[in-house]
């Protein structure tokens, strides 16, 4: 199929593992009405201050988070070290706006990394280029105080060069003090009038610093350095084909949510169904990408029951079908109606979205199939091939008890 362009960071494991957990956690878990609540409601620092004052996640249990991720079949994790609100989950020496100065009083990042690494998952940091709390981050079109009547006065004395230095110091901490970091997920540039881009962040300097401190690290595309990105990150939509940049296939990862927000949202009502969740993973791998699925812990440090249930959907399906995901990619064969194909060498996997009556037809495959079986129980699936090279798989009338049944096809070399 496609061969993506080479990357500076080590994406070999990434393209094999295919499935990761995104964790958005910060002060916004307390208001529990979207991680952009400070921006959406144009809250001042003073109005936002109670969330810092009362941040105390007494039920924080990163081992349980890691257990749920591992059971769901996730192979890596990326957590928000600092989101746009500016609050830091670690004991940074460059700010007082951090978890160690809240009632909780302890570093959070180190414990999360320990828990996930102990279960064999790779680890990464999300780091926001935006910061609505830092006194030197200028008030622009995306700032929470963008409509403040005295915006010009607010910007007096602010110095983005000082903020750039602050970011580099924090990135140096993150990539020095926490052992091997596999991914750094910067977020995000928005160049243009009254916006910010690579010059504001010194994107080249951040990339150089990241690769110097962690030579194998994977860096995403949101520094606004298209030629240097290791992975491309479509957000909250499902690509229909392999992502390409300037006509060239690239390594890519779609980031998605169980509901409509990234941070914990108590009243969110658009939680995805089990079928949607499985199909999102399959759709992604069948078009050559990775899926980074998000959870938003509560103010108490727990994953709520809806998130645990959603992770359980992946747990139950992946227990029987993970080999159609790990190490797989897009197939050059044409998928049957209402199906998606993934492939790993001479192994082809047909994921059935709408279960047909008795037969599943694969066109133009000729005599390539040597043997076929259901993946959930290893039971044989008989097939015939006609003169036109269409294989007809003979299915039982009743669909197996799976949201998305999978047929494994052994191909002749």
Image (spheres, rainbow, N blue to C red):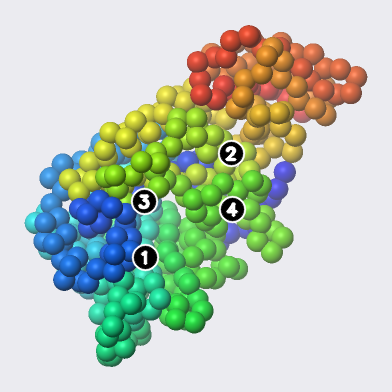
**Mark 1 residue element:** strand
Residue at x-position 30% and y-position 48% = 265
| Comes first in the chain, label 4 or label 3 | 4
* Closer to the eye: label 3 or 2: 3
* Closer to the eye: label 2 or 4: 2
Residue identified by numbered label 3 = 262
| Comes first in the chain, label 1 or label 2 | 1
Residue at x-position 42% and y-position 53% = 182
Residue identified by numbered label 1 = 128
| Comes first in the chain, label 1 or label 4 | 1
* Image spot of residue 374 (x, y percent): 60, 17
Question: How far is disc 2 from disc 4 in space, using C-alphas?
Answer: 15 Å
| Comes first in the chain, label 3 or label 2 | 3
- Binning the other alpha carbons within 10 Å of mark 4 as few (below 14), some (14 to 19) or many (20 upward) gives many
| Comes first in the chain, label 1 or label 3 | 1
Residue identified by numbered label 4 = 251
- The residue closer to the viewer here, 381 or 116, is 381
Q: Quadrant of the N terminus?
A: top right
In contact (CB < 8 Å): disc 4 and disc 3: no
* Closer to the eye: label 1 or 3: 3
Quadrant of the image occupied by residue 405: top right
């Amino acid at each position: 199929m496609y061969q993506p362009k080479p990357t500076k960071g080590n994406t070999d494991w990434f393209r094999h593992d295919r499935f990761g957990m995104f964790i958005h956690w910060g002060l916004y878990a307390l208001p529990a009405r979207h991680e952009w609540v400070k921006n959406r409601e144009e809250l001042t620092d003073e109005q936002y201050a109670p969330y810092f004052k009362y941040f105390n996640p007494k039920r924080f249990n990163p081992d349980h988070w890691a257990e749920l991720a591992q059971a769901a079949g996730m192979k890596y994790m990326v957590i928000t070290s600092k989101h746009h609100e500016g609050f830091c989950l670690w004991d940074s020496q460059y700010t007082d706006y951090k978890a160690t100065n809240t009632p909780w009083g302890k570093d959070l990042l180190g414990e999360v990394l320990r828990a996930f690494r102990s279960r064999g998952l790779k680890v990464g940091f999300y780091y926001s280029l935006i910061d609505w709390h830092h006194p030197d981050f200028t008030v622009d079109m995306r700032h929470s105080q963008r409509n403040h009547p005295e915006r010009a006065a607010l910007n007096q004395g602010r110095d983005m060069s000082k903020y750039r230095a602050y970011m580099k110091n924090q990135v140096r901490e993150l990539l020095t003090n926490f052992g091997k970091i596999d991914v750094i997920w910067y977020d995000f540039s928005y160049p243009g009038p009254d916006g910010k881009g690579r010059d504001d962040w010194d994107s080249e300097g951040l990339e150089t610093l990241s690769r110097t401190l962690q030579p194998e690290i994977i860096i995403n595309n949101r520094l606004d350095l298209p030629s240097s990105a290791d992975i491309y990150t479509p957000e909250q939509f499902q690509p229909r084909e392999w992502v390409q940049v300037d006509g060239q296939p690239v390594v890519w990862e779609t980031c998605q949510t169980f509901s409509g927000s990234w941070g914990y949202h108590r009243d969110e009502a658009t939680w995805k169904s089990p079928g949607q969740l499985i199909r999102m993973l399959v759709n992604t791998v069948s078009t050559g990408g990775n899926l980074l699925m998000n959870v938003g812990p509560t103010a108490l440090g727990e994953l709520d029951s809806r998130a645990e249930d959603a992770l359980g959907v992946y747990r139950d399906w992946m227990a029987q079908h993970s080999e159609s995901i790990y190490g797989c990619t897009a197939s050059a064969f044409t998928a049957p109606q209402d199906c998606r194909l993934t492939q790993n060498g001479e192994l082809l996997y047909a994921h059935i979205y709408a279960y047909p009556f008795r037969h599943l037809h694969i066109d133009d495959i000729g005599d390539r199939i040597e043997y076929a079986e259901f993946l959930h129980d290893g039971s044989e699936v008989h097939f015939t091939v006609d003169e036109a090279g269409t294989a007809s798989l003979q299915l039982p009338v009743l669909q197996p008890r799976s949201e998305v049944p999978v047929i494994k096809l052994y191909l002749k070399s």
